[in-house]
Image: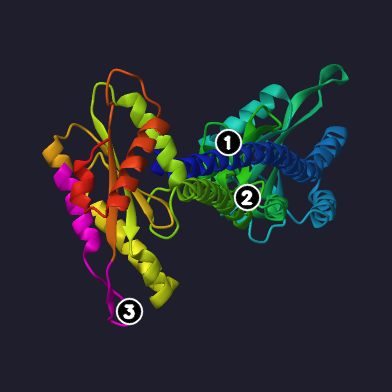
């Protein structure tokens, strides 16, 4: 598990940092979208005001003509042309204005291009007559559209009823209609300008009806919407959303996002490297730098642990001291001596089984901690095998060979009913080692002298 700890730590650090970055970006984006929604509503209000200004300006034309007719109870062609031409000239979005006494169009300005409207009886055009009847009933201007015009094209049509004085001086007698046709494109030019200026998609439709301006998909894009009431009771629905959708509204640009997530990854990598380095340092602190074997510090700790765990299991400590090592250093140099020590370490690992551990205690001193039940013959064979491997020649880089011997001291523990400390076991093995050296005995004899 410990070897995976740096990886898990780095992964956890990256996930935490990435989660924090994602959370911060999420809330930043949410705030940006709220602010964007406010700005979209402001822009949509501007668009609605633009429609309002254009319609108010256009509706002043039929209202003026209606007032003249109501006052005079009549209007001749010359007067109509004079008033209409002046008013229409001031408002280029007006396509035409027509008089329909008795609901039959008898005059239209401009005449050119609108000849088809002359003689039209509203009662014969159901699509338009409904608005005419509503204007007559409410005595108010009614706007319909956009609709297909009789003279061609599509536009908004207003119907302004005219009532003249009847008996008693009241405006009770219905005279007819003043009709106004307004081009759709000029009317919505300001909406396009607002949309382009604010980076928005704006669409307009009759409530619950098909879209007549903009992309119908805007209404499905969770837009900011508002209604525009039309004279006569109808209304339009205006909707707006950021161009590219709300997902395109970001608090920070994409390259900053990539940078933040890269930083999170870098912090995870840094955490991994730090823990891996600490683990490596701890491991190296317990190992001999030259041979890679566990060092004296690890030996003291693990021998103490083995003492606690040995009951009732039998363990053995084998101390090994190299013979004839000093002449190798003196005659061939320290590099040759280092190579010999490295070879001895590799050979000790060959005789150690899974539960056994090899150590370099310092200089030319080594140790084997053998854990698990072993008979005397098996222990004797293992020590003899270790000494035999150590005695095998070591080939130097210059192809010369050197050889060393090994003196050993062995202590089996627990040795009896009396409790022992780790230092007691080490002392027994050390005394056996020195007896072996003093007597010049072979490794096999030393193994037999189990103290």
How far is the residue under mark 2 from the one under mark 1?
Answer: 29 Å
Q: In front of the other: label 3 or label 1?
A: 3
Question: Taking 231 as reference, is 15 above or below it?
Answer: below
The residue beneath circle 3 is 397
Position of the C terminus, as image quadrant, is: top left
Where residue 232 appears, as percent x and y from the top left, is 68, 29
313 left or right, relative to 267:
left
- Of marks 2 and 3, which one's residue comes earlier in the chain? 2
Q: Which dot, 2 or 1, sits closer to the camera?
A: 1
The local secondary structure at tag 2 comes to loop
User: Residue 330, position in %: x, y?
Assistant: 43, 73
Write the start and end of the magenta stretch as one range.
Answer: 380-403
Identify the mark nearer the N-term, 2 or 1.
Answer: 2
Q: Which residue is mark 2?
A: 118
Disc with the residue nearer the chain's start (3 vs 1):
1
Q: Nearer the viewer, mark 2 or mark 3?
A: 3
Quarter holding residue 41: top right
The residues tagged by marks 2 and 3 sit, at their Cα atoms, a distance apart of 117 Å
Q: Position of residue 165 (x, y in %)?
A: 83, 25
Question: Which residue ends up furthest to the bottom in the rendered image?
Answer: 398
Quadrant of res 426: top left
Q: CA distance from mark 3 to mark 1?
A: 95 Å
């Amino acid at each position: 598990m410990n070897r995976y700890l740096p990886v898990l730590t780095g992964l956890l650090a990256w996930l935490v940092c990435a989660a924090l970055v994602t959370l911060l970006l999420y809330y930043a984006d949410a705030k940006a979208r709220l602010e964007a929604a406010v700005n979209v509503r402001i822009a949509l209000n501007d668009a609605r005001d633009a429609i309002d200004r254009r319609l108010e300006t256009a509706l002043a034309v039929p209202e003026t003509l209606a007032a003249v007719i109501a006052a005079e109870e009549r209007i001749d062609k010359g007067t109509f042309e004079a008033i209409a031409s002046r008013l229409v000239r001031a408002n280029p979005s007006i396509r035409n204005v027509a008089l329909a006494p008795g609901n039959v169009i008898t005059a239209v300005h401009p005449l050119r291009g609108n000849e088809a409207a002359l003689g039209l009886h509203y009662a014969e055009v159901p699509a338009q007559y409904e608005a005419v009847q509503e204007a007559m009933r409410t005595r108010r201007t009614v706007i319909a559209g956009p609709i297909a015009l009789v003279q061609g094209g599509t536009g908004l049509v207003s119907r302004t009823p005219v009532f003249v004085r009847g008996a008693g001086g009241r405006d009770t007698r219905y005279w007819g209609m003043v009709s106004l046709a307004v081009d759709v494109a000029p009317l919505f030019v300001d909406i396009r300008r607002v949309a382009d200026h604010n980076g928005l998609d704006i669409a307009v439709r009759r409530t619950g009806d098909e879209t007549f301006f903009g992309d119908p998909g805007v209404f499905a894009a969770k837009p900011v919407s508002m209604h525009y009431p039309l004279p006569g009771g109808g209304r339009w629905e205006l909707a707006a959303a950021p161009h590219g959708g709300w997902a395109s509204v970001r608090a920070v640009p994409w390259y900053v996002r990539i940078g933040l997530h890269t930083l999170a990854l870098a912090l995870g990598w840094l955490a991994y490297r730090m823990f891996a380095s600490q683990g490596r340092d701890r491991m190296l602190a317990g190992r001999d730098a030259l041979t890679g074997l566990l060092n004296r510090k690890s030996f003291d700790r693990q021998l103490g642990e083995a003492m606690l765990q040995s009951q009732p299991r039998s363990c053995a400590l084998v101390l090994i001291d190299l013979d004839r090592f000093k002449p190798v250093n003196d005659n061939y140099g320290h590099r040759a001596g280092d190579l010999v020590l490295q070879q001895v370490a590799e050979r000790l690992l060959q005789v150690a089984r899974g539960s056994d551990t090899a150590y370099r205690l310092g200089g030319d001193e080594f140790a084997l901690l053998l854990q698990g039940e072993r008979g005397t013959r098996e222990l004797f064979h293992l020590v003899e095998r270790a000494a035999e491997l150590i005695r095998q020649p070591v080939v130097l880089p210059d192809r010369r060979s050197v050889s060393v011997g090994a003196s050993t001291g062995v202590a089996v523990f627990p040795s009896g009913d009396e409790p022992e400390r780790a230092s007691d076991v080490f002392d027994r093995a050390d005394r056996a080692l020195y007896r072996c050296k003093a007597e010049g005995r072979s490794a096999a004899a030393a193994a037999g002298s189990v103290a």
